[in-house]
Structures are given as structure tokens and as C-alpha cells.
Image: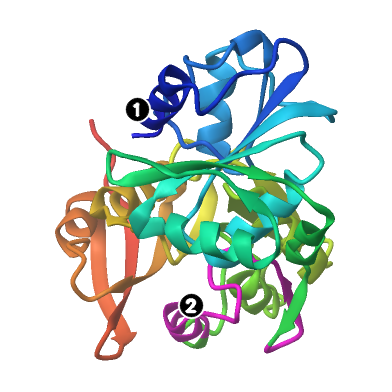
Amino acid sequence: MRSARLELALESGALVLPDAGDILVLRPRAGDDLSSLPQAQVVVKTGFKPDYEYFAAKGYRMQGDGPFALAVVCLPRAKGEARALMAQAMTAAMIVVDGQKTDGVETMLKDCKALGLSVGPALSKAHGKLALVTPGPALAAWAAEPQIVAGGFETLPSVFSADGPDRGSELLAAALPAKLPGRVADFGAGWGFLSRAILAQDSVKELDLIEAEADALECAKRNITDPRARFFWADATTFKPAKLWECVVMNPPFHVGRDADAGLGMAFIKAAHRGLTPSGSLLLVANRHLPYEPLLRQLFKQVEEIGGDSAFRLFRAAAPIRAR
């Protein structure tokens, strides 16, 4: 746990908190305990909406441009994103690198040394490590740079499937019906691959892109310039539309960090069910091992499998069942 390593560093004297100046905490996850840091000095920065809402609700400042006396980098799983966070923290007087071993914290510390940075002794606890890194200009080489992938889409290291469209989304895009209804939503729209396929149809009059990751949504705004598109930085599982949709299209996530969580995809399905008109439909792609079909049959009058391959299944579910 992050809190256990921070507390160990403070108790051992390996980390001495600054008496003055803001402390930047980059990409903590909902549930992380930051109480060992003086809240009045802490600025939390994260682009993931559920995490943002968690720390905002606890009263943390979510904006601040520094200068920062200290930065705490909470390492994510993706190497490119982790490096980009280090570059973002480089103007702080000192950087605390904290992460699980399974998320590559040991590799990150080695890479910092390879850049010529001074790296303090690593403290190990709760299957992770924490170490102090003295920042330097060399970190600028790790700054996030947009890249152009197949189809001319722009992505960033922090977004899902940054190297190009994933197989599930490609299958779903190819299986879209010949004529979609007028009001459509793309849940977990990412950087806009499925949205572009949806907007290829003239029958679509409005498309709501719902995406919880701010970096992905910014990419989507650059990739989708169609005036029919509207963009929402929001958690799809709790988003409430101003007007019900006639169709929801989605390739829902099923991981929280490194851990598979079918409940996340199920929450997407339940949110789509709530947001659809009585005659509305859901178009969904999912890995074959995920247990979504029973829930679909519980929530919709019509459920059919419309394609897939050895790894994925495509479903169409229509006519949401409303509780009486």
C-alpha cells in the first residue's frame, strides 16, 4: 500500500517533508491514503475522473502550477505514461517515486539512474518500493509526445491502446448495423476509434463521447471534428444523459490496475440500460471469458450474439426491461 511506504519513509527519515511549498501528487488512485502528507500543502493531479472525484471530495486541491517543493509520482502500469509523469514532475525540488513491483518500479529506478539522475536507497514494503530521485533536465526526454497511429488517429502514452485500435474495437466497428439511429453514445470512447466509425453514418444526428480519462478525451477531440460529436469527461458508470439515447456502443474496460474486474464492465452495461430509450439498443464487444451474457438477458428483452472471433464476442441487446 502506498500509505505504508510513505509512512515508512517518513518514520525512517529517508523522506523529510518540506516546511513550506506545495507537494504535487501525480496520479494517485481512489482509495490511496495520503494522510501522512500535510493536506494544506498537497496538490493532486490526475486525469482519471473517478480518482479526481475521490480526492476532490476529500477536500484536496486539484489545481496548482507550483513551484513544487516535492513531487510524489504514483507509478501507473504503462511505461510510457510513467515516464511522462516523471517528466511532469521534473521542476519539483525532489521527486518521490512510489509503485508496486508489478507496475515496474524497479525498472523505473534503474532507468532514472541510466539518465544520470541521483537515486536514493529504495524502501520496500507492501509488494512495492519507494525511492527519492533528484530531478534533472534529462527527464525532459520522457515528456509525453503525441503519436499518429493507423487511420491517422492521434494518441498519447497514457491512453488505452496507444499504439493503435484494439482487436475488439475493430470487430465492433466492422459489425455496426447499416443504419444507426439518430442519438447514440460511445461509452469509454477513448481516443475516438469507434466514434469515427459511428459518425461515418449520416443517420446519426448526435453522438455523445463519454470518457473518464482526460488525455484520451483530448485525443478524441483532435481526432473527431464532426459537429455532431459532443464530449464528456465523465465516468460512464454514473453518467446521466440530458436525453435518453437510442443506441449505446461500447468496448467496456474490465481491468482496475492490473486486476481483472468483470464488475466494471457490468457497471457499464447497467449504465447503458438506464440511459436507453424503451426501444433502444446496446452494441457491445467483450472478451469471451467475461460473464456478461446473463446480465444482458436480465436487463434486455432481446439479446443476440452478432459476431466475434476466438477471443471476442459481439452482442446486440435491445428493449431494456424496466422495473415496475
Is residue 53 visible in the rendered image? The answer is yes
In the image, residue 156 lies at what x, y percent?
69, 66
Quarter holding residue 83: bottom right
| Disc 1 target residue | 4
**Element under label 1?**
helix
Marks 1/2: CA–CA distance: 39 Å
Front residue (pair 125, 300): 125
**Number of marks:** 2
Give the numbered dot on residue 311: none
- The stretch in magenta equals 150-173
Quarter of the picture containing the C terminus is top left
| Disc 2 target residue | 169
Q: Residues within 10 Å of mark 1 (few under 14, many from 20)?
A: some
Residue that appears at 58% across and 32% down: 52
Residue that appears at 40% across and 45% down: 129
**Element under label 2?**
helix
Quarter of the picture containing the N terminus is top left
Residue that appears at 28% across and 46% down: 127
In magenta stretch: residue 199? no
Q: Is residue 4 above or below residue 100?
A: above
Residue that appears at 54% across and 51% down: 245
Front residue (pair 171, 6): 6
Q: Amino acid at mark 1?
A: Ala
Q: Earlier in the sequence, mark 1 or mark 2?
A: 1
Q: Is residue 197 above or below residue 130?
A: below
In the image, residue 264 lies at what x, y percent?
33, 49
Q: Amino acid at mark 2?
A: Ser
